[in-house]
Each structure stands twice: as C-alpha cells, then as structure tokens.
Amino acid sequence: MSSDINTRKDISSQNDQGARAIRVVVAGPDGRMGQVMVEGLPKHDGIEIVGQLRRADREQRSELLREADVMVEFTGPESAPELLFEALKARTRPVSGSSGIAESVLVEADRMAREYEIGGIWAPNFSMSSNVMMHAVAMIAKYFSTVEIIEAHHETKADAPSGTAVRLAEIARAAHEADLKEANVRHEILPGTRGGSLGGVHVHSLRLPGDVGWHDVVLAAPDGFVTIRHEDSGSREIYVPAVANAVRKVMQPDVIGLLRGYGSIIGLTS
Ligand SMILES: NC(=O)c1ccc[n+]([C@@H]2O[C@H](COP(=O)([O-])OP(=O)(O)OC[C@H]3O[C@@H](n4cnc5c(N)ncnc54)[C@H](OP(=O)(O)O)[C@@H]3O)[C@@H](O)[C@H]2O)c1
C-alpha cells in the first residue's frame, strides 16, 4: 500500500470526528441521480463535493479519485465495476447506488476493500421504506407457497426488471431455501405473459409514461394471499439524506469491506 495514499486517507478519517469535511467525488454528475447528489450532499453537515467525474474524464480519473475520501456513484451497471475498482485502488471509499451490478464484481470489490482496510457500500435502493419492504418479505415469504412480483417504472428506464424486483425475488427464494413451485401454465397464448422467473418467483415489468415507480409483492398460500406494496415518493431528493448517511458510515474506521444494501446501515437484514 502506498504510504502517501495511506497517510492522506487516515488524516481524513480523523477529521471525520471533528474538523474537516468528508471529501466526496460524484461519478455521473449529469445523470438524474448524480445531479441531485451534487446539489444535495453539500447541504449535509461535514460533507463537501471536491470533484465531479464524467465519462470524458478518463485521463484524470485516478487523480480525481485520490483527492476524495468517498466516491458517490450512480452511473449504471456497465460503468460501475471499473469505477468501483479504480476508487478502491485509490483507497477512496465507494458509495455505489447503481442497480444490477454483477455478484462477481461485488465479491471482488469486497475483497479489495478488505485488503486495503477501508469500507464501502453498494445499495441498489437507498429508500428506507423499500428496504423495510425487503425486510418484511424476508420475514414472511417462507409462510407462502407462491410469490410473484409486479413492478412499474418510467418508460425510459433502460433495464427490466428493476434491481429492487430482482432483489425481492432473491430474498423470497432465499427465505424458502429452495426454488418456489411454479404454476403449470400449459398454454401460454402470448409468449412472455408469465414474466421472467428467478428461483420460481415470477416477475412482471410495466413501463409507463410519467415518473412512476412501485413494486407489488404478492405472497399466496392455499388459504389466501397478502400483497405488500411499495410506492416511490416520486422525488429523487429523498435519496440524499440516505446517501449522506452512507458517506458518513463508510468513513467509520471499523467499517471494513463492502456493505450490501441500505438496510445494513439502518439495522435491517435484507
Ligand atoms: N440506489 C438507488 O436508490 C437508486 C435510485 C435511482 C436510480 N438508481 C440507479 O442509479 C443508476 C443511474 O440512474 P440514473 O437514473 O441517474 O441514470 P442516468 O440519468 O442515465 O445517469 C447516469 C449518468 O452516469 C454517467 N456515466 C455513465 N458511465 C460513466 C462513467 N464511466 N464515468 C462517469 N459517468 C458515467 C452518464 O453519462 P453519459 O451520458 O456520458 O452516459 C449519466 O450522466 C442506475 O443503475 C439506476 O438504476 C439507484
């Protein structure tokens, strides 16, 4: 480990206790989430934005990262892996909100963070209420034989299903410790009508005009069913306090490795 890097980052950690602000670089500052972070994070005590990292800044990327204690990253699953690895190499703690990052990337990022003895977090959903929904599904899914998920987002969303829907399906499957039993639809008149399946949990994506964002988890048993619905407030600003929380969390000296999910910060298991 370069002693130069080590010294600067350690000083910054000490300053987190008092005098100096945590220095943040925002990757993807012109994106929908990035813009909100650039605008909102400096309003939180002890956080300052010291850099903005755009795709075109390839040459200056490692220098920009070295100047910061934390990289806040909302660029998407294709760009995020390289940014995560480069931030960690610069000993800059990642706070990553990109959905759909591959498991192998997260495992490697965790390994690197442990090697460099720094923290980081990947949270595909920084909304407290949706993390509570995931926690609820983790607790009750085992009581139901069938789980299906319906999600709706704006028509310009590039990926389907949402990262949150995938996570909900994983959670329901994990709660069962086996794939769920799927209904036997022998004749699917329109191909794809039953949606995608993850571990026997069927996921259906709606793409609609407007700033829509909701998830329904339908849990069914022979004696009835329960639906849990989470609806976004429609505002991206609501994510800023949670990201500020995460920025502070990853600066704590006892946080080593890559935390998974915003729930891990607020005391929820999923
Ligand atoms: N965790 C959460 O709570 C949460 C909430 C909302 C969204 N998200 C996720 O956050 C991600 C971004 O969402 P968004 O709606 O903000 O997307 P967006 O509006 O498309 O913004 C992405 C931005 O990242 C930039 N970018 C891409 N690759 C880059 C790179 N290598 N270096 C620097 N900048 C780069 C893009 O620039 P170009 O124009 O040059 O491509 C764009 O400005 C998605 O994965 C989304 O699912 C997470």
Image: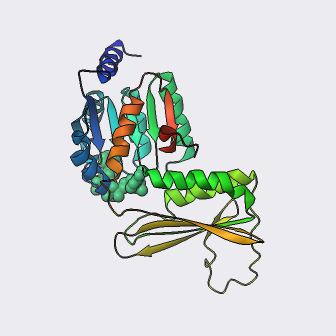
Measuring from the top left, give residue 257's x and y in whole percent: 50, 29
In the rendered view, tell whether residue 2 sits above or below residue 106.
above
In the rendered view, tell whether residue 154 sits above or below residue 46.
below
In the rendered view, tell whether residue 11 sits above or below residue 194.
above
Residue ranking furthest to the bottom: 189
| Colouring of the image | rainbow
Horizontal arrangement in the rendering, residue 228 relative to residue 220 (left or right): left
In the rendered view, tell whether residue 3 sits above or below residue 266.
above
Horizontal arrangement in the rendering, residue 260 relative to residue 60 (left or right): right
Which image quadrant for residue 25? top left
Q: Residue at x 39, y 48 (%)?
A: 79
Q: Quadrant of the N terminus?
A: top left
Q: Is residue 125 visible?
A: no
> Which of 75 and 24 lies nearest the eye of the viewer?
24
Give the total of numbered labels: 0
Q: Residue at x 68, y 57 (%)?
A: 141
Measuring from the top left, give residue 18's x and y in whole percent: 27, 21
Q: Residue at x 74, y 61 (%)?
A: 180
Horizontal arrangement in the rendering, residue 70 relative to residue 190 (left or right): left
Measuring from the top left, give residue 205's x and y in whole percent: 52, 71
Q: Is residue 60 visible?
A: yes
Measuring from the top left, give residue 165's x and y in whole percent: 54, 60
